[in-house]
Image: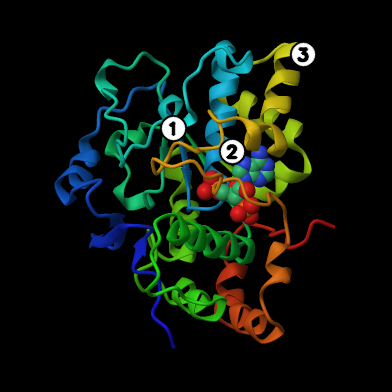
């Protein structure tokens, strides 16, 4: 068997307190310091396992909160509108940032700031069915390796799946641990759970749900704009929303297909059966009804 994912693009992974992080972008000390991060009551965090619709939800949040982004006059990329808690790529001074601050994170629940548990700050946690999540991650890994011209250690889908299922050097940890951890500890947070699939099927309904959670109502015209700007095609063509600046080179690798059920196009019957054997029992314990197919 080929080896599992050892790095994200040109970044090696390092293990700290049960989760992998991108070397050179964050230190173990900084991760530990997040425990005492000064969370404000008005803070909002988008938390996901990677490839679950993070960028999409970041974008939606920024559109709900900021008229200039709805009108496309803000000229600020999503990554700066909703910066990463654990990866301060752009050296944003979080202390100086006006409220309400919007953050993104891939942290497992047990590394979240203590003050997030005051149940005032808001957390939006987005899940995606794990087959599409794995396939999206597989393509992302390939695109990143291509972008950085990394020729070695490119796993095929079978090898990639084994890494995904066993969690060996998978960023940031096993999918099931991330999702079940946040669900199991939901009472400790002021948290709204969403799924990528419900966003695909009823974007407007989900945006309204987010607005209700944030206690932020939009008039009809503003809602129309948020829905329009958050549509896949619009986002893909929007250099501020498609994350093309991340990585320093222009490539729309965060906006790939944007659908449900793409796993069927790449996983073999045997791989699908193996995936089910490993995960199905564990999925039954989650309070989520997964949608596996667009129909
Ligand atoms: P695919 O690779 O399956 O296309 P993340 O932001 O967590 O990295 O997730 C990326 C996934 O979300 C990609 O999935 C991407 O295409 C999808 N995505 C991003 N914006 C979207 C949108 N507006 N509508 C539908 N899917 C979107």
Using a 10 Å C-alpha cutoff, classify the residue at mark 2 as few (fewer than 14 neighbours), some (14 to 19) or many (20 or more).
many
Taking the image as shown, residue 36 lies to the left or right of residue 73, namely left
Vertical comparison of 156 with 249: above or below: below
Q: Which mark is residue 133?
A: none
Can residue 266 be seen from the camera position used here? yes
Q: Residues within 10 Å of mark 1 (few under 14, many from 20)?
A: many
> Regarding mark 2 in the picture, which secondary structure is present there?
helix
Of marks 2 and 1, which one's residue comes earlier in the chain? 2
Task: Kindly report the distance in space between the C-alpha atoms of the residues bearing marks 2 and 1.
Answer: 11 Å
Q: Residue at x 29, y 61 (%)?
A: 13
* Residue 56 numbered tag: 2
Question: Which numbered tag is attached to residue 79?
Answer: 1
Q: Which secondary structure, mark 3? A: helix
Determine which residue is flagged by label 3: 220
Image position, residue 198 (x, y; %): 72, 45
**Quadrant of image for the N terminus:** bottom left
Task: Confirm or deny contact between disc 2 and disc 1 (CB under 8 A).
Answer: no
From where the camera sits, is residue 195 visible?
Answer: no
For label 2, being within 8 Å of ligand 1 is answered yes
Which numbered disc flags the more N-terminal residue, 3 or 1? 1
Locate residue 104, reporting x and y percent: 43, 37
| Rendering colour mode | rainbow
């Amino acid at each position: 068997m080929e080896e599992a994912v050892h790095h994200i693009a040109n970044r090696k992974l390092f293990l700290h307190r049960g989760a992998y992080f991108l070397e050179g972008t964050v230190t173990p000390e900084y991760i530990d310091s997040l425990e005492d991060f000064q969370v404000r009551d008005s803070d909002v965090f988008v938390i996901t396992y990677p490839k679950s619709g993070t960028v999409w939800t970041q974008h939606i949040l920024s559109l709900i909160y900021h008229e200039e982004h709805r009108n496309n006059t803000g000229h600020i990329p999503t990554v700066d509108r909703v910066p990463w808690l654990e990866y301060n790529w752009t050296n944003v001074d979080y202390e100086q940032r006006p409220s309400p601050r919007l953050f993104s994170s891939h942290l497992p629940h047990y590394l979240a700031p203590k003050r997030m548990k005051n149940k005032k700050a808001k957390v939006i946690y987005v899940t995606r069915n794990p087959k599409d999540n794995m396939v999206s991650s597989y393509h992302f890994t390939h695109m990143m390796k291509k972008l950085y011209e990394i020729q070695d250690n490119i796993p095929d889908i079978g090898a990639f799946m084994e890494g995904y299922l066993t969690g060996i050097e998978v960023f940031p940890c096993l999918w099931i641990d991330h999702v079940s951890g946040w669900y199991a500890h939901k009472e400790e947070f002021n948290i709204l759970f969403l799924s990528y699939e419900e966003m695909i099927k009823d974007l407007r309904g989900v945006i309204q749900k987010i607005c209700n959670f944030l206690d932020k109502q939009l008039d009809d015209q503003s809602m129309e704009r948020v829905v329009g700007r958050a549509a896949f095609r619009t986002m893909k063509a929007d250099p501020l929303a498609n994350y093309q600046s991340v990585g320093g080179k222009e490539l729309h690798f965060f906006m790939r297909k944007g659908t449900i059920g793409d796993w069927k196009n790449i996983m073999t019957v045997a791989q699908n059966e193996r995936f089910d054997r490993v995960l199905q029992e564990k999925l039954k314990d989650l309070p989520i009804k997964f949608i596996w197919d667009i129909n």
